[in-house]
Structure formats: C-alpha cells, structure tokens
Image (cartoon, rainbow, N blue to C red):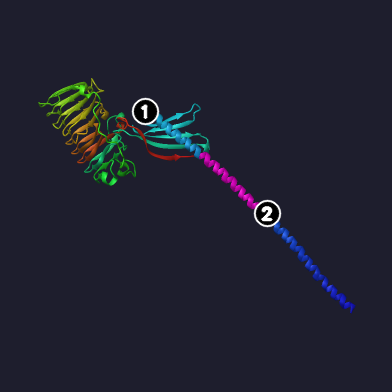
C-alpha cells in the first residue's frame, strides 16, 4: 500500500518539474523576443536616421545648387547687359569672348553669333566640382534688319528661289568661302497663314538633318511702324529735276549732303555715283528700270553711303546697284507709309537693306539681293537669290530681348 502511494507520488514529481521548465522556457523566450524586438527597433531607427541624414544632405546640396544656378543666371544676365552696346561693333568679333576675375576664374562667356544674336553664359565657382554652376541664355537684339526677309502678313518663296547668308565683314559673298546658314525668314502672322514655302524653294541647308522649318519664325510680333522723315528735312537741298534723267547714257554725281527730289528716274544706260554720305527724300517714285546703275562710292570715296526715304513706289528692274565695298549697310531704303510696291526683277542686282512695312515686295526673274528685306508681304520666286548679310542684324538699333532661355549646364 505504501509502496503504491510512494510510486504514485514519484509519478507526480516529473510532471511538476516539466511544468516548471515550461514556465522557465516561456520567460526566457519572452526575454529573447523582447531583445530581438529591441534590436529590430534599433535597426529601424538607424535606417531612418541614415535616411534623414541623406535627405538633409541632399536637401542642402539641392539648395546650394539652386542658389548657385540662380547666381549663374544673374551673371549671364549681367554679361548680356554689358555686351549689348558692343554687338553692332565689327571690332567685337564673332565667336566666344571669355571674361575672368583677377584670379583667373571665369564669370561669364559671351558667344557672338552675328550682329543681333548671342549667348551669355554665367559661371559660378569655376573648377570646384559639384559646386560649379553654369547657366546660358540666348539673346536676340531686335533691329530693323534682324531677318533675311520678313513679311508682316505673308512670305512666299517658290520656283527655285535661293535663300542663304554671308558676312560682309568676312569679304564678298562666295559660295565656297563665305556662305552660311545663319538666316531667318519671319512673319507676324501664323505659321499656316504667314508662309507659303514651295518644294522648289532652295534654302541653304549644309548641316545634316537641318530643315527649312528651322529657319522659319512665325508670330514674331515685330514692330512694323513706318519710318518718319528725320527732323529738319524741310531745310534739305531741293534737287528739283536733277535726278529725273532725260537723256540716254546720262552720267551724274551727287556729293555728301541731304537732298529732296520729286522723283528719281533713270534713262537707258544712265548712271548716278554717290560720293560721301548722302541722304535723299524721294517724294514720289523711284524708277531704275532702264539698264541703269547706281554707284555708291568709288576709289576716291570708298566709304560713301546712301540713305533713301521713299514716299512712292520703287522699281529696280534691269537696274544694278554697285556698292564699292560690297557692303549692304551702305545703302538703306526706308519706304514711308505711302510706299506700296517695290519690284526687284529682270536680273537686277542690289547690295542694300529695305525697310518698307506697308509695301508689297516682289523679287523674281533672276534678281539678286545682298542684304535684307522687311515689308508687309514679300514674294521671292523665278530663280531670285536673297543673300542675307548677317552684319545687318545689329543695324538701326532696337531693344534687346530674350529670345529663348534655357539651362545648358547646372552643376
């Protein structure tokens, strides 16, 4: 009996020990779980902390970069304001011009494309790695002759007409050594209504992938206010009928001065030579359609120029304008508000620039124009050639405006 009880008690003891072990294991597991949870929490906070440091560092870097980019933009704008007065000066050559501090670091770079277009690049912290920042802004100085041809209402180019450009400061136009693609055809009208560019229009496109459309600018909002006569024109010398030629082969010379004439009429094979700086107000029409010639300058007076204010229509058919220095800027024509029609046809050749905002200009039948044409409407066809002189771009003043603005490099 006792033996059985003792045996029964001995059987109970192992169960009590197992229960105690389970409790001990449970407490240890709970402590281990707490430790694991603590470690996981520490890892999470460490990751969050590292992320916060990265974010703060990135935010600081971004703020510094943005600040430097803004400073670079101010540098670019400052460079533009500095260089605008220099743009028309031929001594300020095309290409890059680098401006530096005394320690040799660059603060802005001007790249002159032509007389009216340039880029200004502002530079901050040059040579300092990620701290360096550059911003480039492209500018155009608005002027009367900043386009090869500009028709406020419409420009039509077709039937083998040729459009290209050159720089008179680099010498005469030459298809091999002085021919460029720095020309633009513009209109104040829309792209669809302002341009009629036929497949036969020959735009000089030397660069691979270049298209005609890259040279068309619509909705320009160019100021087309007609020019007014200069103050004091009433006191200019009246030439009466001096420039209305009456006999074939008539030869005349006009020296420096300001003149008024009722009209200008050239007879067959006649010629007029300009010596010195001459300004003429033609009240009526200009007719040079009889195989005549207008000579601006000669060996004795190479720096001569002619500026004309024309109240009527103009006809350059069969007329040749000889410019002694082949410089279109030496012959400027201002069509007044009453000038409605200008013809350049029949193998005529002209070095000059025409601003006639109320006129319709027709150029055709092998006519050749070296310079620029600005008018209400312009038609160029029948093998006519228009060679834009890039050096006209800064001529006749105008206010500077931003054409486009973009970040070229920001570090």
Q: Provide the residue designation for mark 1.
A: 85
Which element carries disc 1, helix, strand or loop? helix
Is residue 296 something that shows in the picture?
no
Query: Which labelled disc corresponds to residue 409?
Result: none
Q: Locate the N terminus and report the quarter of the image it occupies.
A: bottom right
| Position of residue 209 measured from the top left corner of the image (x, y, whole percent) | 34, 45
Return the residue found at the far right: 2
233 relative to 61 in the view: left or right: left
* Within-10-Å neighbours for mark 1: few <14, some 14–19, many 20+: few
| Position of residue 196 measured from the top left corner of the image (x, y, whole percent) | 25, 45
Q: Per the image, is 101 magenta? A: no
Q: Per the image, is 55 magenta? A: yes
* Vertical relation: 102 (above or below) 54: above
* Vertical relation: 287 (above or below) 153: above
Q: Provide the residue designation for mark 2.
A: 39
Quarter of the figure with residue 296: top left
Q: CA distance from mark 2 to mark 1?
A: 70 Å
Q: Which residues are magenta?
A: 40-65
48 relative to 357 in the view: left or right: right
* Within-10-Å neighbours for mark 2: few <14, some 14–19, many 20+: few
Q: Earlier in the sequence, mark 2 or mark 1?
A: 2
């Amino acid at each position: 009996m006792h033996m059985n009880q003792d045996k029964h008690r001995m059987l109970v003891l192992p169960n009590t020990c197992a229960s105690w072990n389970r409790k001990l294991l449970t407490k240890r597991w709970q402590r281990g779980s707490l430790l694991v949870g603590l470690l996981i929490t520490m890892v999470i906070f460490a990751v969050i902390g590292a992320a916060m440091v990265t974010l703060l560092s990135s935010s600081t870097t971004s703020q510094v970069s943005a600040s430097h980019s803004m400073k670079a933009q101010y540098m670019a704008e400052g460079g533009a304001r500095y260089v605008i007065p220099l743009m028309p000066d031929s001594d300020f050559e095309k290409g890059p011009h680098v401006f530096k501090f005394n320690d040799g670091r660059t603060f802005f770079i001007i790249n002159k494309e032509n007389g009216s277009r340039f880029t200004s690049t502002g530079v901050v912290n040059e040579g300092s790695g990620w701290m360096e920042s550059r911003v480039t802004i492209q500018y155009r100085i608005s002027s009367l002759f900043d386009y090869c041809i500009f028709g406020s209402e419409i420009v039509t180019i077709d039937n083998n007409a040729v459009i290209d450009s050159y720089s008179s400061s680099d010498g005469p136009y030459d298809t091999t050594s002085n021919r460029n693609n720095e020309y633009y055809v513009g209109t104040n009208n829309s792209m669809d209504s302002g341009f009629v560019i036929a497949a036969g229009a020959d735009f000089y496109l030397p660069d691979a992938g270049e298209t005609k459309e890259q040279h068309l600018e619509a909705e320009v909002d160019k100021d087309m206010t007609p020019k007014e006569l200069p103050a004091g024109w009433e006191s200019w010398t009246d030439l009466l009928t001096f420039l209305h030629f009456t006999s074939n082969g008539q030869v005349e010379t006009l020296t420096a001065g300001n003149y008024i004439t009722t009209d200008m009429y050239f007879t067959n094979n006649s010629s007029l030579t300009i010596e010195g700086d001459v300004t003429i107000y033609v009240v009526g029409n200009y007719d040079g359609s009889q195989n005549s010639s207008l000579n601006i300058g000669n060996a004795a007076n190479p720096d001569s120029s002619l500026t004309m204010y024309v109240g009527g229509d103009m006809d350059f058919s069969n007329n040749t304008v000889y410019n002694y220095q082949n410089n279109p800027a030496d012959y400027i024509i201002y069509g007044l508000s009453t000038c409605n029609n200008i013809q350049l046809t029949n193998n005529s050749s002209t070095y000059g620039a025409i601003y006639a905002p109320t006129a319709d200009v027709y150029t055709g039948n092998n006519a050749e124009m070296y310079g620029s044409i600005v008018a209400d409407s312009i038609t160029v066809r029948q093998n006519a050639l228009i060679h834009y002189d890039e050096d006209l771009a800064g001529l006749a003043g105008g206010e500077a405006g931003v054409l486009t603005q973009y970040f070229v490099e920001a570090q």
